[in-house]
Every structure is written in structure tokens, then in C-alpha cells.
Amino acid sequence: MSSFAIGIAPQALARLNSVLSSKLEFRVESSKAVVDSINKKRKLGTKRAVLFNQLSGSNLHAVRPIDLLRKLGTLTTPASANMARLSASWATLRYCWAIEPNSGKDRLPLRLSPDARQLDFHQKTLLSDEFGIAFAGLLIERLLGTSEHADVSAVLKGRKIKLPPATLTGRREPDYVMWGPTTPYYIVECKGTQSSKAQCIRQMASGLGQVQSLSFVGPRRAVVKLVVGTQLLAGGTEIFVVDPPDGE
């Protein structure tokens, strides 16, 4: 933490430490109710969402803000960038103020701070999008065993990534491919909103087509396509996960 302390006022540093050490939690749900709601909003011709069995039900998961923000920094920093590991720390300073701290012994729901909830529309949209990326990446890493990731734009440009060649049908691509030594390739579209569950459902319905647009040529392992929606509401954070399979 000392590397972040340069030029930070004592009060701000105290809040930084309080936020990053907070004991928080979020809920993950993949349920029939969510699937049915998304399928009602899907576009004609888009494959239907189904339950993602590995995360089925509704369960609470612990999270430390420092792990969440580090994941965001890692996912959004190009591996080829100079000093990439150091550059990936940007999210910790950029968004530590946006999380409401918890100094108690018991875990509390992860909530955005009042300042974060009062941002103007464009800044709020950017924050929601990036927290959607952070939660999806952390969730898939922890619960599905991934350790590698690649931005889909980089995959399509044929950069030196240990993945099969990929093709895109349509104009809108998903966000990431994530995988581990023994996992499937997870093609992931990340959504995030502070508006409402209804808005999150609409976003995820749109994401069904995005994950279906990417295909690998001759993959040597299974491919799973996930749409992950994060709703950052006043009372806490909930993550919805659905799996629009290649076969009906």
C-alpha cells in the first residue's frame, strides 16, 4: 500500500485503507425466473438463455474490494503495455472511493458510495460498465477456475494469444475469452447497471447475441458462452449469469 501513499492526504489514505480491507459480499443468481425474464426480452432469432448449472440457485459470496479492483485493472490493461503489472493498479486508485466501506466484523452487502451514486449519467454509465467487468472476471476466476483472459478485439486481430483462431458474425462482439489449464473456453459478455433489475435484464438479453457472434475454429476443448449482468443497487450488488448454448 505504501506505493499508493505518495501525495495522498492522511484522511484520504485512511479511507483507502478502510475500503480495501472491508468485509463485503455480493449475491450470484442463475435461476429460472431470471432466464425467463431475459428470454422475454431477447431479439427474434437470438438463441434462448438457459440456466448455467454450475452457478444455479442464489448464493452469497464474500469479496474484498482490493481483489475486485485489482481484477478490473488486470482485465482492462493490455498485456503488451509497458509495465503492465504496475499499470493494472489504476483501478484501485480510480474507484476505491466508489465503494462504501465496512469497518465491522460481519460482512455487509457491497454498495456504491453516495458520491458514486450521484455521478452524472456518462460517468455513472462508465463506472457501471467497468464494475460489471470486474465482477464477471472475479466471479469466473474464483468459481470456474480460470487464470487467463484475452480481450475479444485482440483475439480477432490475431495477436499472439494462446487461443484457436476465431471468427465473428455480426457487428457486436462479446468482451472477453477466459480460460484455465483444464477449463472450457468461456466467451463472456459483461453488463453492469445502477438503474434497476429490469434494465439489467434488458442488457443481458442484448448480450445473448453478442456471445453467440464469436466462434472458434477447431477448438480442442469445450466452449461455454456466458452473459453476466451486474446490478449495483442501493441495497447491495447482485450478479446474474445465464448460458446461451450453441445447441438448442
Image: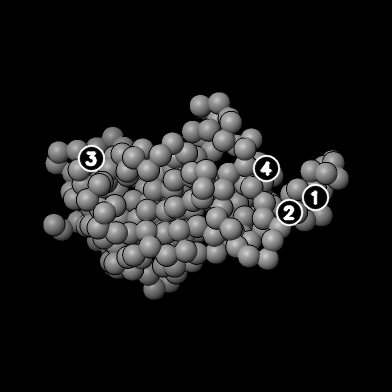
Q: Are marks 1 and 2 in contact (CB under 8 Å)?
A: yes
Residue at horizontal 18 percent and vertical 48 percent from the top? 47
Q: Are marks 2 and 4 in contact (CB under 8 Å)?
A: no
- In three-dimensional space, the C-alpha distance between marks 3 and 2, rounded to whole angstroms, equals 40 Å
Residue 65 or 160: which is nearer the viewer?
65
One can see residue 20 in this view: no
Disc on the earlier residue, 3 or 1: 1
Residue bearing mark 1: 14
Residue 162 horizontal side relative to residue 36, left or right = right
Residue bearing mark 3: 41
Q: Callout 1: 10 Å neighbours few (<14), some, many (20+)? A: few
Q: Amino acid at mark 2?
A: Ser
Residue bearing mark 4: 97
Q: Amino acid at mark 3?
A: Lys
One can see residue 183 in this view: yes
Disc on the earlier residue, 2 or 4: 2
Task: Please provide percent x and percent y for residue 52.
Answer: 29, 62
Residue at horizontal 36 percent and vertical 38 percent from the top? 199
Disc on the earlier residue, 4 or 1: 1
Q: Amino acid at mark 1?
A: Ala
Disc on the earlier residue, 3 or 2: 2
Quadrant position of the C terminus in the picture: bottom left
Residue bearing mark 2: 18
Q: Amino acid at mark 4?
A: Trp
Residue 131 or 180: which is nearer the viewer?
131
Task: Please provide percent x and percent y for residue 74.
Answer: 57, 52
Q: Callout 3: 10 Å neighbours few (<14), some, many (20+)? A: some
Task: Please provide percent x and percent y for residue 53.
Answer: 29, 67
Q: Callout 2: 10 Å neighbours few (<14), some, many (20+)? A: some
Query: How many marks do you count on the picture?
Result: 4
- In three-dimensional space, the C-alpha distance between marks 4 and 1, rounded to whole angstroms, equals 11 Å
- In three-dimensional space, the C-alpha distance between marks 3 and 1, rounded to whole angstroms, equals 45 Å
